[in-house]
Image: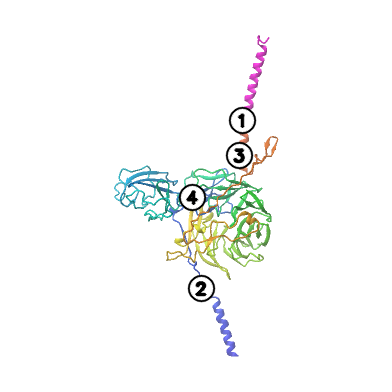
């Protein structure tokens, strides 16, 4: 018995000794690091808005970057196109060895054009023409109207001394030395047939300084508070503003050439300014908007009308987040409550009154049936909390982050189960790995930067560089410098092949439901795609704005629907000055008519007193 008791004591001591030792945790994301882009790959000279509204003021997809900007009178935002075939193009036409090159520079930095021709019989390297350059295949006769920047080496051209080196346009596949051209920037050459074969030289995206007169989307009468790209139609963006409106904009395929003031759809339903907009994650043309009137409106853009209203909040709504299939909506409110709502009925399924943890932001953690909130503790320290979506009575865990005062923005990657926390006003981005068992949150690392961030945009998965093992990409807004800085989160791998373990199937750009199906009660998970071959499928969905019949309510000769009352102070001032100008014009017209009446009265009097009339 004594020996048995001794062994139990030793075993208990051994167990206590093991409890304090750090346990090794195997994870493929333990060494993920953040890499900020160099200055030449940033966007400079952007007048980022100085609005203090707690939002990101930035929206990103695989084709466009949108940033809310500072403007005088009304609200505006920039839309920068970075599709690969939008920056420069080279059009090549062949006629028995003669090469005619038309190079257009569409960058805002230099609207130059070079036209040159030469007779080439051997492969050569097309370079920028300079005096005494022996590597340039063109003779000295060709001219360059304006110097083009960054034209050190465009690519290797293999010229055949034959007419029509391509196959006919009826061939489905193209076999040509021009189909793939090695290039230091890995640019893409596209071919088409319209009489002559054309080669379009594509650049990755436009970076550098943005001109002050760059075209903007400027149709709102108040400050723009939030913007979001449609996840299924990449050139459709929704915006909301202090003018109580939500507007849908259709960006041209080639980007903006001039200021855009007319939206394809204007949605009015809120009585106060609108602070948030969110697209449904699986259904096309379903948009949610939250206003300072404490209401959430669900818009069916097929008909351009609100179809549901969620009226369960007692104060300003701070954040909205959907679960994977969009059947649940989580909201945080200024009344210090966290709610899980069934959006179609507006019924509150769960509600948490956060006394010790004042919630600001919430995010669904994919399909784990958990929520994560960021907020402030009772000691005014920044804090995160993990919740079970089916029981919000108590958080699963609470963890204090630091004592800074800026808002914490949470970002969750459902493919890698990684959580990113970025603080407003500081330059740090912490990232964690979410587990299914305690302690649930595992700290990985922290990206540090001295430049404070106002907001962050996130690139969708199908826009990442899988060849560099990039798993997440931020676009950081630095207001003091007027700079947009890309930050890539990279998994260090030596192999250059596709890494299937860090790139599982991910949601694509095809909707799983129509608005009528979702409104009838159908739930469906998003349609997944693989990034192995580089996801380049363009959505065939086209946004069609509903045609509305113009209604009129005429009272005393005034159309009340045409003369909408002003909603903001700026709009009121504009209407006041417009009315003052109209009153001044009418007074001038009235005085001219008075003079004309006097003239006619005098002529009539002279006519009556004339001898002929007697």
In the structure shown, which secondary structural element does the residue marked by tag 2 occupy?
loop
Verify CB contact (< 8 Å) between mark 1 and mark 3: no
In the structure shown, which secondary structural element does the residue marked by tag 3 occupy?
helix
The residue that disc 3 covers is 574
Q: Position of residue 610 (x, y in %)?
A: 65, 11
* Measured Cα–Cα span from mark 4 to mark 3: 33 Å
* Among numbered discs 1 and 3, the one appearing first in the sequence: 3
The residue that disc 1 covers is 585
The residue that disc 2 covers is 24
Magenta segment boundaries in residue numbering: 587-614
In the structure shown, which secondary structural element does the residue marked by tag 4 occupy?
strand
Q: Which mark is residue 81?
A: 4
Mark closer to the observer (4, 3): 4
Give whichever of 578, 94 is nearer the camera.
Answer: 94
Q: Residue at x 65, y 14 (%)?
A: 607
Image position of 604 with respect to 423: above or below = above
Given the current orientation, which residue lies at the most extreme front position?
170
In what quadrant of the picture does the N terminus appear?
A: bottom right
* Among numbered discs 4 and 3, the one appearing first in the sequence: 4
Mark closer to the observer (2, 4): 4
Mark 3 crowd level (few <14, some 14–19, many ≥20, 10 Å Cα): some
In the figure, is residue 356 to the left or right of 65?
A: right
Q: Position of residue 20 (x, y in %)?
A: 55, 75
């Amino acid at each position: 018995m004594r020996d048995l008791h001794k062994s139990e004591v030793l075993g208990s001591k051994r167990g206590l000794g093991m409890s304090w030792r750090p346990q090794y945790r195997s994870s493929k994301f333990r060494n993920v690091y953040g890499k900020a882009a160099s200055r030449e790959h940033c966007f400079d000279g952007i007048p980022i808005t100085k609005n203090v509204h707690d939002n990101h003021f930035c929206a990103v997809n695989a084709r466009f970057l949108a940033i809310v900007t500072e403007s005088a009178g009304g609200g505006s935002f920039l839309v920068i196109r970075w599709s690969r075939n939008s920056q420069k193009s080279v059009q090549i036409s062949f006629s028995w060895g003669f090469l005619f090159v038309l190079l257009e520079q569409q960058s805002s930095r230099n609207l130059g054009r070079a036209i040159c021709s030469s007779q080439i019989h051997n492969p050569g390297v097309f370079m920028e023409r300079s005096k005494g350059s022996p590597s340039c295949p063109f003779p000295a006769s060709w001219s360059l109207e304006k110097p083009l920047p960054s034209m050190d080496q465009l690519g290797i051209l293999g010229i055949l001394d034959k007419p029509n080196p391509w196959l006919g346009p009826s061939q489905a596949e193209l076999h040509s030395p021009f189909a793939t051209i090695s290039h230091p920037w890995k640019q893409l050459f596209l071919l088409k047939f319209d009489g002559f074969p054309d080669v379009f030289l594509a650049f990755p995206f436009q970076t550098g300084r943005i001109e002050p007169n760059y075209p903007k989307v400027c149709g709102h009468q108040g400050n723009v508070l939030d913007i979001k790209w449609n996840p299924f139609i990449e050139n459709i963006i929704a915006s909301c503003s202090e003018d109580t409106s939500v507007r849908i904009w259709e960006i041209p395929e080639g980007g903006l050439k001039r200021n855009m003031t007319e939206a394809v759809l204007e949605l009015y339903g809120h009585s106060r300014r609108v602070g948030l907009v969110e697209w449904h994650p699986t259904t096309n043309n379903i948009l949610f908007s939250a206003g300072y009137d404490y209401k959430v409106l669900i818009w069916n853009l097929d008909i351009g009308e609100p179809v549901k209203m969620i009226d369960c909040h007692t104060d300003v709504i701070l954040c909205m987040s959907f679960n994977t299939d969009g059947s649940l909506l989580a909201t945080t409110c200024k009344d210090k409550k966290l709610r899980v709502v069934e959006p179609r009925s507006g019924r509150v399924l769960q509600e948490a009154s956060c006394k010790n943890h004042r919630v600001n932001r919430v995010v669904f953690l994919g399909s784990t049936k958990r929520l994560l909130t960021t907020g402030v503790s009772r000691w005014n320290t920044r804090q995160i909390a993990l919740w079970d979506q089916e029981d919000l009575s108590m958080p699963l865990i609470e963890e204090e982050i630091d004592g800074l005062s800026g808002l914490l923005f949470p970002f969750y990657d459902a493919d890698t189960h990684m959580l990113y926390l970025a603080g407003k006003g500081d330059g740090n981005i912490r990232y964690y790995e979410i587990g299914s068992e305690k302690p649930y949150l595992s700290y990985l690392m922290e990206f540090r930067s001295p430049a404070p961030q106002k907001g962050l945009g996130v690139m969708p998965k199908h826009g990442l560089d899988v060849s560099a093992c990039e798993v997440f990409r931020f676009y950081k807004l630095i207001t003091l410098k007027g700079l947009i800085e890309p930050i890539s989160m990279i998994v260090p791998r030596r192999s250059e092949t596709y890494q299937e373990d860090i790139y599982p199937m991910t949601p694509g750009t095809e909707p799983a439901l129509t608005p009528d199906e979702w409104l009838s009660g159908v739930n469906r998970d998003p349609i997944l795609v693989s990034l192995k071959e580089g996801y380049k499928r363009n959505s065939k969905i086209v946004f069609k704005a509903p045609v509305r019949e113009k209604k009129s309510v005429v009272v005393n000769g005034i159309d009340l629907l045409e003369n909408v009352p002003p909603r903001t102070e700026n709009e009121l001032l504009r209407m006041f000055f417009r009315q003052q100008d109209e009153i001044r014009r009418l007074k001038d017209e009235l005085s001219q008519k008075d003079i004309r009446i006097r003239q006619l009265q005098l002529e009539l009097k002279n006519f009556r007193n004339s001898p002929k009339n007697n």
